[in-house]
Image: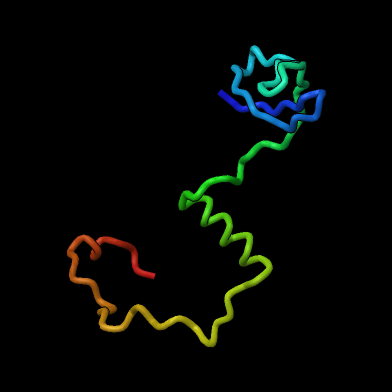
Amino acid sequence: MPLYEFRCAADCGPFERSFPMADVPGTTRCPRCDRDAVRRVSPPRLGHGSSSAMNLLDRTKRSAHEPDVVTGPPPSTTAGRSAVTSNPLHRRLPRP
């Protein structure tokens, strides 16, 4: 169930309550002073978390403004590899 933010009329500060999306009230009772508190519209908390996906998104955003500086091309990964394959199935492939 999502969390909804409410603010008390007596300025007790904001507090959160969890309700089903179909049954969200416009007001609820303040836990401190027991007065009516109205629901506030607040942004969703989509960027909170420490998962690897969130870290990847953060690095992607940061690289748009602070790209990594490189001094040259990456090292070749074909060193030690043969240009000719020994797999017999590759003989049937069309040649370039």
| Quadrant holding the N terminus | top right
Front one among 77 and 70: 70
Task: Please give left or right for residue 40 compared with residue 79 in the image.
Answer: right
Residue sitting at 71 percent across and 37 percent down? 43
Front one among 81 and 95: 81
Whole-percent x, y for residue 67 in the image: 62, 72
Task: Please give left or right for residue 23 compared with residue 72 in the image.
Answer: right
| Quadrant holding the C terminus | bottom left
Task: Please give left or right for residue 76 compared with residue 5 in the image.
Answer: left
What colour scheme governs how the chains and residues are painted in the rendered image of this protein? rainbow
In this view, 74 is above or below 4: below
Q: Quadrant of residue 92?
A: bottom left
In this view, 88 is above or below 40: below
In this view, 42 is above or below 80: above
Task: Please give left or right for residue 35 compared with residue 46 in the image.
Answer: right
Q: Quadrant of residue 66?
A: bottom right
Whole-percent x, y for residue 26 in the image: 75, 16
Instruction: Point out the residue furthest to the front here.
Output: 33
Residue sitting at 21 percent across and 60 percent down? 89
Q: Quadrant of residue 36?
A: top right
Residue sitting at 75 percent across and 29 percent down? 12
Residue sitting at 25 percent across and 76 percent down? 84
Whole-percent x, y for residue 73 in the image: 49, 83
